[in-house]
Image (cartoon, rainbow, N blue to C red):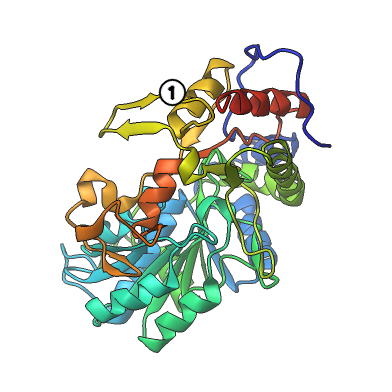
Amino acid sequence: MGFKRPDTIKPFDNKIWLASPTMHGDELKYMQEAYETNWMSTVGANINEVERITCEKIGCKYAVALSAGTAALHMAMKLAGQELYGQPNVGHGALEGKKVFSSDMTFDATVNPIVYEGGIPVFIDTEMDTWNMDPIALEKAFETYPDVKLVVMAHLYGTPGKIDELKAVCEKHGAIIIEDAAESLGATYKGAQTGIFGKYNCISFNGNKIITGSAGGMLLTDSKEAADKVRKWSTQARENAPWYQHEELGYNYRMSNVIAGVVRGQYPYLDTHIAQKKAIYERYKEGLKDLPVSMNPFDAENSEPNYWLSCMIIDRDAMCKQVRGERDVCYVKEAGKSCPTEILEAIASINAEGRPIWKPMHMQPIYRLNGFITRKGSGRAMTNAYIDGEAVDVSMDIFERGLCLPSDNKMKVEQQNVIIAAIRKCFE
């Protein structure tokens, strides 16, 4: 169904969220099963089953259910660090002092686990075709830092990146890939599910994801040895002894059997949720098609996103003046033009939730001194510069001009039409 302009634009009685959990009832059945069998801790049938379902769905050999996607990323960093650099001394991370290449436009959960293990993130700029890590910038990064052996790539907002090109660069330089598929469960690249393209890979069941456990995540791998290590590390690294024996550092990272029950109840609805999210994306695309904006892009020839969040970006010449500080922002209204701040305010005024695009990691105060590489080389001296009309710092450009739209799959068509009308009004 295409866009139909509503007669009036007035606030919704109930808030339209960016992306909230969509529950179906089966979740309660499996939670109840955990309760009645008294398997309320970090072992039980629900955990076993969600690990099995995940392997079957994604195509990996082993899945380890953990407390969060961030925990899975941390365990992936530890695995990769030990494989590349050996067992660290107690008190030192597996990546101690080593540089690691990371997606720049992502949530900081992609990056923080590098630091947990003592690594030093170096950020790789974004490409405009999918809003993911730029293979050309990655090649430039290896020219600058030839000793780097680990690359962490995320699939932004459920859209697969240029996987073949990124893998080719990494293979050329002998680097291991960790795939952060936290946002892209169910998305495919050349017919294969995201979450199988790295040596170690991660997905998330956080409350806002395409399916949820309220929390939780998975470490995915084809290595039995790696899966067994993570199962051990995530339960405080207990040794096989009659008493509590500890010979290496451990963590309390295992998924609860209760949370696994929620995930188990959600899994049958993954494809339904994706179809609902795709319909939302397409309605936005239709309703905004004659405005100077475009939707978050993807490679239609090679990939199918899970459409987790619908986003838009304003044409550069249709941007009104907008200035962002560290925590504050202001803009100047201009006829026929708009900016993310104005549109987000308009969405909020009708009781709906939008959000700015992820602020790039190289712009974050905590990581502002870390390396940042664009396809032109180091991005530090050219931040916010343009060459021949093209952005040098692509991540910053998308952040400045883009925003995430309400993408809750319980949103009705009529409600989405009101949101579209509010966006259109910003350009009058």
Q: Along the horizontal axis of the image, is 177 left or right of 370?
A: right
Q: Nearer the viewer, residue 233 or 296?
A: 296
Q: Quadrant of residue 293?
A: top right
**Residue type indicated by callout 1:** Lys
Q: Quadrant of residue 27?
A: top right
404 to 192, vertically: above or below: above
Location of the N terminus (image quadrant) = top right
- The location of residue 107, given as percent across then percent down, is 40, 48
Q: Nearer the viewer, residue 208 or 68?
A: 208
- What residue does disc 1 label? 333
Q: Along the horizontal axis of the image, is 185 left or right of 314?
A: right
**Residue that sits furthest to the right in the current view:** 1
- The location of residue 227, given as percent across then percent down, is 48, 70
- For the question of whether residue 82 can be seen, the reply is no
Q: Residues within 10 Å of mark 1 (few under 14, many from 20)?
A: some
- The location of residue 374, given as percent across then percent down, is 33, 65
- The location of residue 123, given as percent across then percent down, is 31, 62
User: At x 27% / y 48%, what residue is drawn?
Assistant: 363
Q: Secondary structure at mark 1?
A: loop
Count the marks: how many?
A: 1
Q: Quadrant of residue 147?
A: bottom left
Location of the C terminus (image quadrant) = top right
User: At x 46% / y 52%, what residue is drawn?
Assistant: 69
User: At x 69% / y 69%, what residue is drawn?
Assistant: 301
- For the question of whether residue 245 can be seen, the reply is yes
Q: Along the horizontal axis of the image, is 241 left or right of 314?
A: left
